[in-house]
Amino acid sequence: MLDQTDAQILKELTKNCRIKVNHLAQRVHLTAPAVTARINRLEDTGVIKRYTIEVDTEKLGYDRQIFIRAAIKDAKQRLEYNDLIKRHRNAIRHHYRVTGDMPYLIEGAFHSRAELNDFLLELGEVAIYKVIDVIDQLI
């Protein structure tokens, strides 16, 4: 079970996973060794699975950020669908299985409208889909 201090530690690490332990200790009102022990326990129990970064995709030239809801047309095409996702893994930021009539959610970032269109043409061969275009990130 997580206590309030563990929750605070996780919140701070979510904001900045590179925060120095002594700064984190000050924010949660513990000593640095106590915070280190808690972080180690959270890692060992699998609460913290990995540390990652978030990049600004537009600064990397990926101007077309989208979400795509998808459903495979025929169960026989599952392998083709998975191969398509793997081939475009550089443009696909996240790929989820979700509830509803379209069980896949793809979060993607493409360099151009043409690159997105090419992906959608390929996707249309194995799946039905709906595109949700990202206008702006609010937070």
Image (tube, helix red, strand yellow):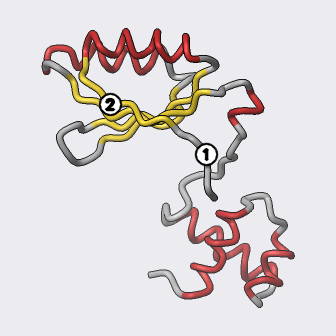
Mark drawn on residue 54 = none
| Residue in the image at 59% along x and 51% along y | 50
Mark 2 is surrounded, within 10 Å at the Cα level, by few (under 14), some (14 to 19) or many (20 or more) other residues, namely few
Q: What is the three-letter code of the residue carrying label 2?
A: Lys
Mark 1 is surrounded, within 10 Å at the Cα level, by few (under 14), some (14 to 19) or many (20 or more) other residues, namely few
Tell me residue 37's x, y (percent): 68, 75
Q: Nearer the viewer, residue 73 or 10?
A: 73
Q: Nearer the viewer, residue 134 or 37?
A: 134
Does residue 41 sit above or below 68 in this rendering? below
Q: Nearer the viewer, residue 135 or 115?
A: 135
| Residue in the image at 44% along x and 81% along y | 1
Q: Is residue 54 left or right of residue 103?
A: right
| Residue in the image at 59% along x and 80% along y | 6
Q: Nearer the viewer, residue 83 or 130?
A: 130
Contact? badges 1 and 2 (CB < 8 Å): no
Tell me residue 18's x, y (percent): 79, 58
SS at mark 1?
Answer: loop
Give the CA separation, mark 1 to mark 2: 19 Å
Q: What is the quadrant of residue 119 in the picture?
A: top left
Tell me residue 71's x, y (percent): 23, 29
- Considering the image in quadrants, where does the C terminus appear? bottom right
Mark 1 — residue?
136
Does residue 73 sit above or below 28 in this rendering? above
Q: What is the quadrant of residue 131 in the picture?
A: top left
Q: Is residue 139 left or right of residue 20?
A: left
Mark 2 — residue?
130
Comes first in the chain, label 1 or label 2:
2
Q: What is the three-letter code of the residue carrying label 1?
A: Asp
Tell me residue 126's x, y (percent): 25, 14
Q: Is residue 123 left or right of residue 94?
A: left
